Image (cartoon, grey):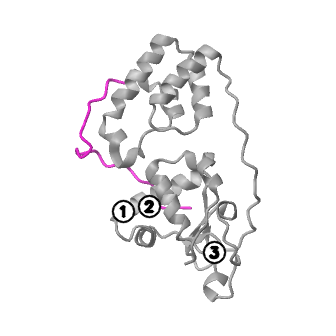
């Protein structure tokens, strides 16, 4: 496996910025494990051994994170003729500078899924806020305390729908601070914290105040979808 030399622009990727800390670490481990064309087998058990040889990571976690990366547009799934499923880093050619050939003469590479090289896109321009100055200050207060900072534009739109005054903004912030102490929000690096836009759209500040629980407390098991493409 060759060393990978990554472009510094990876630090300003909005897609990567959507990920939780655990998901981002998984993505970087994936980067140093794929072949020269950005492919790797998508079997969760094999991926767990490859990406985390010194840790015990559950197959269900691998499945969840792969679907999360797919939703964020960072990976795509491909099925070979023999039925084997592969995952490919979507913008592999953009994030790394390895000049090795994209395909080799080995039989292993020849029977991998074939696709056209991804088109390089210019980094998107920053989104201008549609909020008024007083509303923008209130949103910034909410954004500063919300622990999962993804989808800021959608969160702004959701925030604007309710036109919160200072009092309602205080209520939202208190609800977020209380939720931070719950086991669900502290569990596994915070990967089960809802996106801020989702939290706002569901008016979660109106929920009954959550009870603070230790992270190790017993929780109802979360339903997992069957593995698919």
Residue 60 in which image quadrant:
bottom left
**Which residue bears the numbered disc 1?**
57
Other-residue count near label 2 (Cα within 10 Å), few / some / many at <14 / 14–19 / ≥20: many
N-term-proximal mark, 2 vs 1: 1
Please state which of the two labelled residues, at mark 2 or mark 3, is closer to the viewer. Answer: 3
Please give the name of the residue rendered at 41% of the width and 17% of the height, measured from the top-left corner.
171
Element at badge 2? helix
Element at badge 3? loop
Question: Gap in Å between the C-alphas at discs 2 and 1?
Answer: 7 Å
Could you tell me if the residues under marks 2 and 1 are in contact, i.e. CB atoms within 8 Å? yes
Mark on residue 36?
3
Please indicate, yes or no, whether residue 161 appears anywhere in the rendered image: no
N-term-proximal mark, 2 vs 3: 3
Q: Is residue 219 magenta?
A: yes
Question: Gap in Å between the C-alphas at discs 2 and 3?
Answer: 22 Å
Please give the name of the residue rendered at 47% of the width and 57% of the height, measured from the top-left corner.
25
Q: Of 96 and 108, which appears nearest the observer?
A: 96
Q: Of 224 and 49, which appears nearest the observer?
A: 49
Question: Residue 75: image x %, image y %?
Answer: 60, 59
Element at badge 1? loop
Picture quarter with the C terminus: bottom right
Could you tell me if the residues under marks 1 and 3 are in contact, i.e. CB atoms within 8 Å? no
Task: Give the residues drawn in magenta, as a range.
Answer: 207-229
């Amino acid at each position: 496996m060759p060393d990978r030399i990554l472009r510094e622009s990876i630090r300003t990727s909005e897609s990567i910025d959507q990920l939780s800390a655990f998901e981002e670490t998984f993505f970087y481990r994936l980067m140093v494990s794929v072949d020269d064309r950005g492919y790797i087998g998508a079997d969760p058990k094999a991926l767990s051994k490859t990406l985390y040889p010194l840790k015990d990571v559950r197959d269900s976690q691998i499945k969840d994170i792969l679907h999360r990366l797919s939703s964020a547009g960072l990976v795509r799934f491909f099925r070979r003729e023999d039925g084997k499923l592969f995952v490919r880093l979507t913008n592999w050619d953009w994030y790394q500078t390895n000049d090795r050939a994209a395909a080799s003469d080995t039989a292993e590479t020849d029977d991998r899924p074939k696709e056209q090289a991804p088109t390089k896109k210019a980094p998107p321009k920053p989104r201008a806020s549609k909020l008024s100055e007083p509303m923008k200050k209130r949103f910034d207060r909410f954004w500063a305390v919300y622990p999962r900072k993804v989808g800021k534009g959608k969160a702004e739109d959701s925030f604007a729908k309710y036109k919160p005054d200072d009092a309602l903004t205080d209520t939202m912030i208190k609800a977020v601070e209380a939720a931070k102490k719950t086991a669900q929000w502290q569990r596994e690096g915070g990967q089960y914290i809802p996106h801020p836009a989702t939290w706002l759209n569901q008016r979660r500040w109106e929920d009954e105040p959550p009870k603070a629980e230790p992270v190790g407390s017993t929780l109802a098991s979360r339903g997992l979808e069957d593995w698919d493409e």
